[in-house]
Amino acid sequence: MILSRFMERQLREPARHDPYRSSSKPGGQARCSNCEAINVRGRWLAKLDGQKQLKKLTPEANGNTPKPPEMECPACRQAKEQYALGVIELHGEQWKTKSELVMRTIEKTEEIARARNDQERVLWSRTLRGVTKVYVSLPELARHIGRTLQKAFKGKAKYIRTSEEP
């Protein structure tokens, strides 16, 4: 009995408050007006992946397909309103000698993560007083980039969770 309660507590994940993710699905197959991602069954997919999914789901009648409604995807809204849920901070002088390689590694990591979930994106970056901060749409992507940089460049990583994060 005690074990089952313990396991039940571990399996439950606290809900993260994210104002950009809605609990309801948009009607039809919505298309993002900025990045052209397509919402298929409540999940945002990259343009090419979304088109493949739509072809599987909807048979074309007479070659006329209705134009999907346009709206902004959550990641584009986050970028527009400058609301990041994850931050990667690059400190010190040593990484600056390899800054081009570090930034390429971040881009490749984002590309791989975005193949799984189109909403995992690097939103913007900023350098202030020698510290470069890379802002991302989801905390999972920030952790993934941190682990990748740590392994690739033998650096130190420190992970700080917010109270809203599981």
Image (tube, helix red, strand yellow):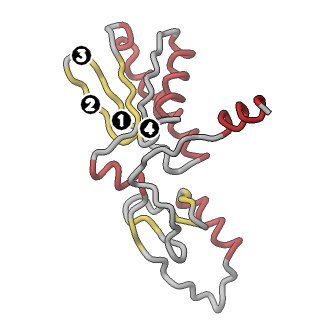
Which residue is the extreme one toward the right?
1
Q: Residue at x 80, y 33 (%)?
A: 1
Which residue is the extreme one toward the bottom?
62
Query: Which element type, helix, strand or loop, lies under badge 1?
Result: strand
**Residue flagged by tag 4: what amino acid is it?**
Glu
Q: Which residue is mark 1?
A: 135
Question: Residue 130, labelled with which disc?
Answer: 3
Query: Which element type, helix, strand or loop, lies under badge 2?
Result: strand
Foreground tag (4 vs 2): 4
What's the CA distance linking mark 4 and mark 2? 24 Å
**Residue flagged by tag 1: what amino acid is it?**
Tyr
Query: Which element type, helix, strand or loop, lies under badge 3?
Result: loop
Picture coordinates of residue 151, whole percent (x, y):
57, 15
Q: Earlier in the sequence, mark 1 or mark 4?
A: 1
What's the CA distance linking mark 1 and mark 2? 8 Å
What's the CA distance linking mark 4 and mark 3? 29 Å
**Are the residues tagged 1 and 4 within 8 Å (C-beta)?**
no
What's the CA distance linking mark 1 and mark 4? 17 Å
Question: Residue 126, labelled with which disc?
Answer: 2
What's the CA distance linking mark 2 and mark 3? 10 Å
Picture coordinates of residue 87, whole percent (x, y):
38, 30
Q: Is residue 157 above or below residue 142?
A: above
Q: Earlier in the sequence, mark 4 or mark 3?
A: 3
Q: Earlier in the sequence, mark 1 or mark 2?
A: 2
Q: Residues within 10 Å of mark 4 (few under 14, many from 20)?
A: few
Question: Residue 164, labelled with which disc?
Answer: 4
Foreground tag (1 vs 2): 1
Question: Residue 38, labelled with which disc?
Answer: none
